[in-house]
Amino acid sequence: MSVKDTEKQREVFCVVRGRIYRGVLPGVPETVRTLDLVNNLNRFQTLFSGGSLLPGHLPLQNVEIVLPGGGRWTAPEIMLRAADILFLYDNYPHLGDVLERQRAEKADTLGGEQASGFAVSRLRVLIPRSEGAFYELVGCGRGRVKQLMSRRFWALTGVDIRDVSGGADGIRVRDMGHRPFVAVNGSMIESYQLEDSDR
């Protein structure tokens, strides 16, 4: 596939069940948020020749797949089905953080304080990754719950991620670190908790 040489590339980390895909999104203007890209995959169709990108797929180049146990597999290019992504994050924290906050604050102002739903500040999300295991994400959702849940992917900022699993020896919790920005696949959420909200 040929991608315009003048376009930018953005590194992303896509978490699916049992694997993490690390790669670059081709043809991404610096001013476009990663969240907007994954919510509008059609923009990638025009970047590829021959119509080789299937609808609903995210093109990744220079791909490294991290497997359970730490094994790694590489590929020059992969088309990843967006519906299978649990959550993803990028290496452009300012795009996911400052601009997302500004956009959401503007939307709240236009919608008025009495708009339906909640003005969310802190949100805890549980996403199953396998039988007996789940990811816990705690971060800030800028906007209202109804608006957040209506999107394919929606943003959490200032996110702490933990991998929680259970077995014969009890509960194991692995800290996956802090991320300035995470795009969460709303259809993958099993449960959530509003830790601090205005009703």
Image (spheres, grey):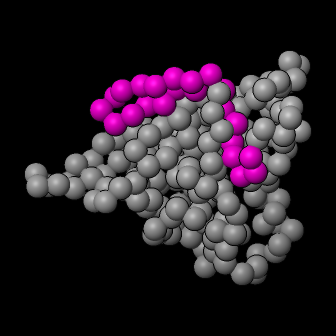
Residue 198 spot, x, y in % from top left: 60, 73
The quarter holding residue 170 reads: bottom left
Q: Is residue 109 above or below residue 47?
A: below
Q: Quadrant of the C terminus?
A: bottom right
Q: Quadrant of the N terminus?
A: top right
Residue 61 visible in the shown view: yes
Q: Is residue 186 above or below residue 156?
A: below
The quarter holding residue 181 reads: top right
Q: Is residue 89 above or below residue 128?
A: above
Residue visible at 71% across and 52% down in the picture: 56
Extent of the magenta region: 54-76
Q: Is 198 or 146 nearer to us in this picture?
A: 146
Main secondary structure type of the part rendered in magenta: strand
Q: Is 116 or 187 nearer to us in this picture?
A: 187
Apparent side of residue 189 relative to residue 148 in the rendered image (left or right): left
Residue 33 spot, x, y in % from top left: 76, 42
Q: Is 151 or 18 nearer to us in this picture?
A: 18
Residue 110 spot, x, y in % from top left: 87, 68
Apparent side of residue 168 relative to residue 82 in the rendered image (left or right): left
Residue visible at 34% across and 28% down in the picture: 70
Residue visible at 81% across and 63% down in the picture: 107
Q: Is residue 56 magenta?
A: yes
Residue extending farthest to the top is: 5
Residue 12 spot, x, y in % from top left: 62, 34
Residue extending farthest to the left is: 169
The quarter holding residue 171 reads: bottom left
Q: Is residue 4 magenta?
A: no
Residue visible at 71% across and 32% down in the picture: 25
